[in-house]
Image (cartoon, grey):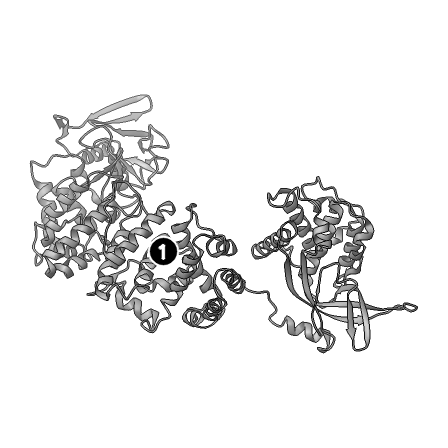
Amino acid sequence: MTPLKCTFKDIFGCVIEDGKTKIVLKDIEIPRIQRDYAQGRLKDDVNRIRDRFLNALLKAITGNNDIILDFIYGDVKDYTHPGEIFKRGLLTLLDGQQRLTTLFLLHWYIAKKENIDNNEYEFLNNFTYDTRFTSRDFCKKLICFSPDFNSEKISENIIDQPWYPYEWRSDPTIQSMLVMIDAIHDKLTNHDDFKNKKDLWASLVDNKKVSFYFLPVKDMGDPEELYIKLNSRGKSLTLFEQIKAEFEKNIKQLFSEEYTNDIYKKFDNTWADMLYPYKGSNKIIDDEFMRYFQFISDILWYQTQESYEPEKDAFKIIDSLFGKDCANANENIEYFEKSFDCWCGTNINSIDSFFTKYFCINSYETDKVKLFQSNINILKECFNDPRFPLTRKLLLYSINTYVQNRNIVSEAEFIKRIRIIRNLIENSENEILQKQMKPLLAESKEIILKENISKSETGSPGYNDFQKIEEREKIKWLENNPDMKDELYQTEDHKLLKGSVSIIGLENSGNFKKFRVLFENRDKHLIDRAMLSLGDYTQKKHDRFYTALNNNWDELFHHSNQRIGFDRTQNILNKLLESFSENDNIEDKLNSIIENYLNDKNTIKDWRYYFVKYHKYLNIDGDGNYIKGSNIYGYEIVKLNRYQLNGYNWNIYLYLLFKENTDKLILDNYYKNYSAKLQYKNNFIDCLHDQFIVYQGENTTAYKIDQENGIDTEDRVEKGRNILSSLGLS
């Protein structure tokens, strides 16, 4: 039978030819076998579908374009009443329930809002539910009810009616209908495109702006069996399937039918084949596709949109980036296609083998780039990780740029250039932000295609300026020292350096191997003590200074605009490296440096002396961050256990005494109680820059620390021990 094009009103009265018999369709019934009305469910995916469906309907009603809602299927039965001269038809709906129920509610709302005569919308009485009697009764009551359109939510007005029984709150169809009514009300009341529009009934009913195709299925077997076949999957279309259809619809408006069909085949064939090895536990590729789709869209969003924050709604993404109203739609679709095609070509037979060929994750390998993470296959990580971070996006974008341009970038050039990208990413923590992604992507592309590291003014958007300078210097240095390539790259790949060798310096390249030997499975606290013995290597930020205690090496070994003293750390480190040869016993050498420092009669007892001597109590309970105070010799140092001052922080010398006797002493939080002191029984002890003070009730006793020109000549920690001993601490 030829499908009939109908509007919601027209279908009531359309003529169905059954052989020689003509049946006039009068009623539509949702059968018991059908699911509940679902377009009003409060779930993210349903919210999105509802919003888009209503927008499409209302754009048609209020605009110039019509909309056709595809096919409606149902079984038509003759249930002519005795004495009637025409054949009366009952349509038992098999497919189209959701769309027709929404149209029922939309007609009801507009009819009531525009005070349409009852006779005009009487056909609504012929739409009924047989799934539950409550749903059927609700529809009848609704048709007779005129709501208060000044209400913020029409549903609340309905629920307050005396004819609305409490048990209806348990009917999922009724609850979904109420949500849809509120959604219609909100659109026509608050949405700028639809509010204050008039004559919507005429547009909907007379001008037939919304229609569908109706196909009776009387000759297709038992209706219930047919329903089961139509719904055999037991679930709605996945987001991937919806996006695929939406994408096809959009490119149809921009490209030829041949190109559109080609893209659609790629969705189902080559692209699906590429993704299939990475399918999840559900055995389908939908989630993996959507994550890669989001990655590609994010890249395009950063490059073409004004907003820093990429859109996450997949349907809005398609409209914004690939729709006919997007100025860059053609270029965006081309990039989208290339981003999939580049991993489907014959030159890359295995994605896994591509990544293992060029990258490593454990130790240095010649002609490979070490990644400081657990996953070597960045593309697979993108497929699997819904929170794919900005650093990975930059790296994958750079890799994709090469794979899409293998005809102009050689393999050797790629290995060299992706190392530069790795180095920049690892050393641009403060620069890699949403708002900077556009220039970061542009710089990445220039490096991959041309090995051009842009020179920019300090502080301008892009990768870290210090690291860009270093990368440019490395290129020139390698031109003059090609035999040192492996030495440089192996040092770059050290886990404490992550691409930056500035802490050693190209001018000190003879120390590269020594650095690796020194920090290879070595006691880092021993190295810290040796460096402090050679000089003050710490870096400062505002009133705080940073040591490498608690393994802060990676921070100190990288340039930061937030800290000063990088050159000081560099000088002391190289001084230590130059003090030994690669064949020395490193532990013996470090211990010798420390012992010489502590035993030298010329060593002043400033904060460095105490940090070297009493290190075992300073490498726990903290981040290696301290506040030195006004005394230049560090006799007012506060140890920060947490970065903020409201954490547990202590006077360093009281802290050292406390750690020796934690079972007998109490040390309060320094910034919790600004007069915090070390407590032994009823004695309270404070440490100032030149004395200890003991408080015993109202009595105070001062214990001067021997000093010369403001510098300790006796060990103040030993002095504190003696004071505690005199108070009875054994």
Which one is nearer the viewer's eye here, 133 or 288? 288
Position of 190 relative to 300 (above/below): above
Q: Would residue 74 appear left or right of 88 to someone viewing this image?
A: left
Q: Would residue 47 appear left or right of 209 to someone viewing this image?
A: left
Residue 20 appears in the figure: yes
Which one is nearer the viewer's eye here, 4 or 423? 4
Specify the quadrant of the image occupied by residue 540.
Answer: top left
Residue 172 appears in the figure: no
Which one is nearer the viewer's eye here, 535 or 15? 15
Label 1: element kind: helix
Position of 346 relative to 297 (above/below): below
Q: Residue at x 40, y 50 (%)?
A: 304
Where is residue 520? Give x, y as percent: 18, 57
Q: Would residue 156 appear left or right of 603 to someone viewing this image?
A: right
Q: Residue at x 75, y 49 (%)?
A: 111
Specify the quadrant of the image occupied by residue 535.
Answer: top left
Give the position of the N terminus as an image quadrant: bottom right
Give the position of the C terminus as an image quadrant: top left
Where is residue 281? Give x, y as percent: 47, 68
The residue at the far top in this view is 698
Binning the other alpha carbons within 10 Å of mark 1 as few (below 14), some (14 to 19) or many (20 upward) gives: many
Specify the quadrant of the image occupied by residue 222.
Answer: bottom right
Where is residue 392? Give x, y as percent: 35, 56
Residue at numbered disc 1: 393
Which one is nearer the viewer's eye here, 54 or 506? 54
Q: Amino acid at mark 1?
A: Lys
The residue at the far right in this view is 83
Where is residue 71? Give x, y as percent: 66, 66
Position of 392 relative to 411 (above/below): above
How many circles with numbers are drawn on the protein?
Answer: 1
